[in-house]
Image (cartoon, grey):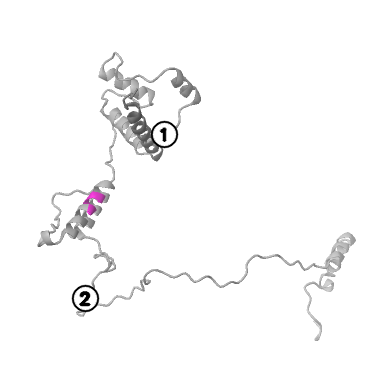
Amino acid sequence: MRPGRAQTAYNPADYDYLPVSAEIKELFQYIRRYTPQTVELEHSLQPFIPDFIPAVGDIDAFLKVPRPDGKPDNLGLLVLDEPSTKQSDPTVLALWLTENSKQHSVSQQVKVKSLENAEKNPKAIDNWVESISELHRFKPPATVHYTRPMPDIDALMQEWSLEFEELLGKVSLPTADISCGLAEYVDMICAILDIPVYKSRIQSLHVLFSLYSEFKNLQHFKALAEGKQALQSVWIPSCSKPDRR
């Protein structure tokens, strides 16, 4: 390249030695004829200053003061590292871990908490009762392993077909007043709910009652039950008023 001459991306003289036909050489001319266009792309990103959002409390900088003897304290590894405002009760925390892990060992050592002068500290007793009540309220359900294949509860909670719902509008479900034995009645209800019944009906009954418990705890059915109960409480007193004529 000659000095003082600007270097270009394409120089036709560099390709004159190629043994190609005249048609191909004519195609090379379109490279010099093409003029690229500058297209400005629209963008939606704009610099801005974020709003100031105050944070509650201080951010944990993980700056722990070491022990004077230099031994590791294992905070966060062996000992739960919590703020000093409201710390967990070690006994309650151990019960939570035992229930969630489902490792109930008889040989495991359990710390028993005692409270001195309990009559002078009713708040600690109330906190203990509330913690244990919350533990029992959110206790994970027991896991049952069936010996025979059983359907999933979510599959049993699906809506019935339109034809079956129309049939229920004409023919009601069998009640306990039907003339049959208890075993036949269990087989009948399980067949309607698509619950398989084997030689022993214990596992089928467990699935049946688990399905009933799931439906009972649904918010939709709770609202219907509360609304029905409120309607009955309003309707019964109005009907029980004596006639003053």
Residue in view at x 22 percent, y 77 percent: 67
| Residue 192 lies in quadrant | top left
> Mark 1 or mark 2: which is in front?
1
Q: Secondary structure at mark 2?
A: loop
Magenta extent: 130-134
Which three-letter amino acid code belongs to the residue tagged 2? Answer: Lys
Mark 1, residue position: 155
- Compared to residue 152, the image places residue 181 above or below, namely above
Q: Is residue 67 magenta?
A: no
Badge number at residue 71:
2
What x and y, as percent, mark residue 145?
28, 37
Q: Residues within 10 Å of mark 2 (few under 14, many from 20)?
A: few
What x and y, as percent, mark residue 190?
34, 24
| Residue 121 lies in quadrant | bottom left
Seen from the viewer's position, the closer of residues 134 and 202 is: 134
| Residue 183 lies in quadrant | top left
Chief secondary structure of the magenta portion: helix
